[in-house]
Image (tube, rainbow, N blue to C red):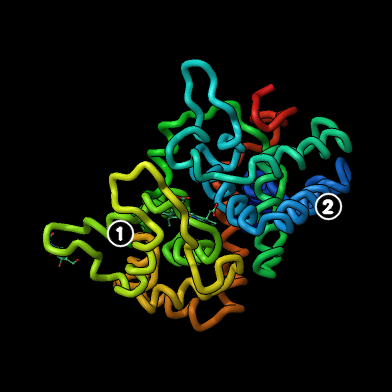
Amino acid sequence: MDINTPRLLPIISTLVLILVSVSSFASASLKVGFYASTCPSAEEIVRSAVNKAISQNAGIAAGLIRMHFHDCFVRGCDASVLLASTPGNPAERDHFANNPSLRGFEVIEDAKAQLEAACPQTVSCADILALAARDSALKVGGINYDVPTGRRDGRVSIADEAAQNLPAPTLSADELVSRFSRKGLSGDEMVTLSGAHSIGVSHCSAFSKRLYSFNDTFTQDPSMDSSYAETLKANCPAPPSISDPTVSLDPSTPIRLDTKYYDGLINHRGLLTSDQTLFNSQSTREMVLTNANDAAGWSHKFGKAMVQMGSIEVLTDSNGEIRNHCTFVN
Ligand code: HEM
Ligand SMILES: *[C@@H]1O[C@H](CO)[C@@H](O)[C@H](O)[C@H]1NC(C)=O
């Protein structure tokens, strides 16, 4: 024993070193400043394209944050949401969860065109989406966070996978918790990220059952403030209707990413069933109250949760490709 120890020690420490380096290699594939030497202006280019677009139309910020979410939940953050449908294969972006509501595609295209001019075949579309979401949160919410980059772009996009992976606006809190946990996100991260509904709009069709045909006993969802419901009815036609207008998800501060969304839930003014359920369910109510009462804490958690969401099933190293054009595979 005493004799063997000095010989075993170097062997054991070598083994430990190998194990440590293998595991850190596996988790360190995305890193902040991935393009620092290969394309130093990458983040600046994305930010200026995003800021320009938002200054013309504040709603674009909402579109870009949602686009990153819809990218990451379907096949990981691989820009599959940007690929065009091909004959015989409808792509994610043409699924009804994305078309016609998803917006901001032209901003990504604009950034990509500038990036290809500055540093050809270097910056992935998936990273542009992640950066654009952050730049949007900064512009309309003052929320800043570092975005690890180094994602690569996928080559596959299938419309049905949007239906399977994107949560429907009719889900209960428990169903939402389980949908997010499948993607490695906690209940608290789900509630925190839902705060993105502090900006942007929804088409009436996503919630009009709450106004006109809730269930056999109630025409109106009893969990919705009745004067809010009346206001919404004035803007949303009863189904079936050909027109499908949009209303603000958070009418109190519709273009400011803040915690007023959570105040709305507490006041029974959540627009979607999936919003109001977060306050009405025992399992998530405390989180809603905490976020409502701590704007700075929520902002910080939001940035962290966006980074977490941005790391779902990413392609790195030699996987995937750097697309030349975000709409098409190479
Ligand atoms: C918790 C589950 C979620 C459900 C069920 C859900 C559902 C929806 C629905 C139905 C809309 C309206 C789309 C339309 O009709 O135009 C919407 C909009 C939006 N969602 Fe979510 N969402 C969820 C989580 C998230 C997350 C995690 C984010 C981002 C972090 C997000 C960001 C947005 C934004 C910013 C909008 C407004 C988009 C715009 O104005 O263009 N949502 N969401
Ligand atoms: C209708 O909804 C109310 C409120 O959520 C509920 O208490 C009631 O049981 C529902 N009725 C039917 C017939 O589903």
Which residue is at the front of the view, 310 or 197?
A: 197
Residue lying at the far bottom in this picture: please name it.
293
Q: Which residue is mark 1?
A: 172
Which residue is at the front of the view, 108 or 152?
A: 108
Beta carbon at label 2 within 8 Å of ligand 1:
no
Residue at image position (28%, 55%) is: 209
Left or right: 278, with 84 as reference point:
left
Residue 138 position by quadrant: bottom right
Residue at image position (54%, 81%) is: 294
Which disc number belongs to residue 228?
none
Beta carbon at label 1 within 8 Å of ligand 1:
no
In the picture shown, does residue 86 fall above or below 265? above
Look at the image and tell me whether residue 8 can be seen: no
Residue at image position (62%, 64%) is: 303
Q: Which residue is mark 2?
A: 44
Look at the image and tell me whether residue 220 can be seen: yes
In the picture, the quarter occupied by the N terminus is: bottom right
In percent of width and height, residue 84 lies at 58, 27
Residue at image position (33%, 45%) is: 241
Residue count near mark 1 (Cα–Cα under 10 Å), binned few <14, some 14–19, many ≥20: some
Q: At label 2, which amino acid type do we have?
A: Glu
Q: At label 1, which amino acid type do we have?
A: Ser
In percent of width and height, residue 74 lies at 49, 40
Q: Please tell me which of labels 2 and 1 falls first in the chain.
A: 2
